[in-house]
Amino acid sequence: MILDWEKTYRERLTTPEAALQMIPKGGRVFIGSACGEPQLLVKTLIDIAPKLADTEIIHFLDLGNTPYADERYDSHFRHNALFIGANTRSAIREGKADYTPIFLSEVPLLMIRNRMHIDVALITVSPPDKNGYVSLGVSVDITKTAADTARYIIAEVNPHMPRTHGDSFIHVSRIHAFVENDAPLLEFIPKPLGDLEKNICQYIAELIENESTIQTGVGRIPNSVFRYLKEKRDLGIHTEALTEGIINLVEAGIITCGKKTLNPGKIVTSFCIGTTRLFDYIHDNPLFEFRPCSYVNNPNIIAQNDKMVSINAALTVDLTGQVCSDSVGFQFYSGIGGQVDFVRGAAMSRHGKSIMTLPSTTDDGTKSRIVPYLDQGSGVVVTRGDVHYVVTEYGVAYIHGKSIRERAMALINIAHPDFREELLSAAKKQGYVFKDQILPAVLYPKEYETTFTDKKGEPLFFRPAKSTDERLIQDLIYSLPKQDVYTRFFTHLSSFSHKVAMPLAAIDYQDKMAIMGVIGREEPESKEQIIAIGRYFRDPITNFAEVAFTTHNEWQNRGIGSFLLKYLIRIALEKNIKGFTADVLAQNDRMMKVFSKAGYPMTTHLEQGVYEIRIPFEKELNGKDARGFR
């Protein structure tokens, strides 16, 4: 290290033209990433193109202009993208530029092992501090490793570049040439969210627990999740890409990083994309710790964060759970990036969750993005063995550890309704599901999800049945004592087969309704379990509905049956059902007591040891509108 760094800086300060003369013909040039792109150096690089030949440009996540990918510069430059941005997508599609698919965590290894040697690194840095250190600011990612391994470093010194903490510093003595440029950094302003994206973000937010540590990938939906986390507490951040959404949550005391098990008290990131507001916020702010991707994206490092949640975008997901997120058929669209790094890191984390997000259809609505199989040429970025949660605007599918049949049904249930029958037909043809499998004709009514606190003070989650609940319903029935089965079905069942269970799960939510109490839904390591079901089937002739209940014996005498009856009455009133009927064994005193407390007149008729119950819904009850029941 040179002690008189100021003298060194002055001696190495030069013009961009002079600095770039060090690029050898046939050399490989690295350009700083995203908002950290050295704009003046890139512009000058184009100006001196006639003096260069066969120069390979290495870039990760370009946001600025990329004229070096234009056809007129073919003999001077060849662009090699480690992640494809909008500016180079057409050039790569036409074969005029290259794409290197690789996990972001492994890019530094290519450089360190000289498999992707860097002749010249073009970077943007902050002005030197009093000790002679410049900061890479918003772009540490692979830029730090490129600078560490490059034979020659040219730094564009920009006073707009924030000074960020962490492993982001380079001493002046290690840089070979400096070029000064006082210009605003490149900014990234995402498009506003539509209702579809908002619905997806709300589903994602429901999966995030308090004290989780979050990663968000590049994409409009992952970057917008933060605005839906205002009710959470003590969140942490460990992410490759930092976006503006975190600022409001930090200032509101929601993102504290205080409960992180790794790097507590620190937002750990690798680069940021946003506007001047974000750049000013991270400037000299010790809350933020910028580190290279070799650390931030290392799955073994990621896994050390308890409750690690990764949120990444997909282009398509097939019915077996394979995720394509870098191409559309043979046309490469984006890149692998850090998606797999965080999916696997989150999977290894204690109570971790990995979430893949995508709209259910293409932008024009003509194609489903949940597909029977990936198109020819589409690459598998995240394997079917890696995927945990898939989220569309129609709900959440948890498929990790599930059979092909279970995951196919779960994914069909969150596909766009216009394509569900088509997907089901394909799944049958491919041998993924039962040949007689049916689907609900209407959408899952999420508005009927609710919670109930039982007599022991335990809050329980209740929701409508789904067609994917068939196995869970079977598990409940098989777990009941023989006497409970007889009390419920009036017979000793030897089996509760698919043909019996499927109609109880694949309901229409209109004439057939079932509300289930479930436990285990918050823990991805544990299996969701049904502890109670209340259901009704409407008779179209009488407009009365037959109602029945099943509660696991360990959860009886806790008020669950009474709650389910009243809740089903509320739903039935909304569907204009005139009343309930039920058949109850004479010795089933507990169930008779539940019906007697329904709040409506009840008539009974005893025949051969079975009470036939009839409960008409009166319009007025104690001076109140029965439809106002809550």
Image (cartoon, rainbow, N blue to C red):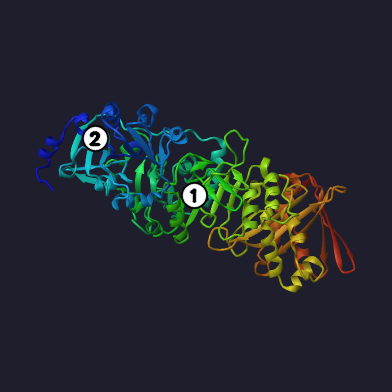
Mark carried by residue 490: none
User: Closer to the camera, 231 or 354?
Assistant: 354
Q: Which residue is identified by label 2?
A: 156
Type of the residue with mark 2:
Glu
Q: Gap between marks 1 and 2, in whole Å?
A: 35 Å
Q: Which quadrant of the structure image shows residue 461? A: bottom right
Can you name the residue that lies furthest to the right here? 607
Residue 595 placement: quadrant: bottom right
Foreground of the two, 219 or 199: 219
Amino acid carrying label 1: it is Val
Towards the viewer: 271 or 598 = 271
Q: Is residue 614 left or right of residue 551?
A: right
603 is higher (above) or lower (below) than 156: below
Task: Compare residues 557 and 483 and report the one nearer the observer.
Answer: 483
- Residue 415 seen in the figure: yes
Q: Residues within 10 Å of mark 1 (few under 14, many from 20)?
A: many
Q: Residues within 10 Å of mark 2 (few under 14, many from 20)?
A: many
**The image quarter in which residue 402 lies:** bottom right
Q: Position of residue 180 (x, y in %)?
A: 21, 31
- Residue 623 visible within the image: no
Say if 588 sits above or below 537 in the image.
Answer: below
Q: Nearer the viewer, mark 1 or mark 2?
A: 1
Q: Secondary structure at mark 1?
A: loop
Is the Cβ of the residue at disc 1 closer than 8 Å to that at disc 2?
A: no
Total numbered circles: 2
For residue 381, the mark is 1
Question: For the residue labelled by badge 2, is the local secondary structure a helix, a strand or a loop?
Answer: strand
* 576 to the left or right of 340: right
Q: Position of residue 296 (x, y in %)?
A: 36, 52
Which residue is located at x 10 percent, y 38 percent? Answer: 7
Coordinates of residue 209 in the picture (x, y in percent): 49, 54
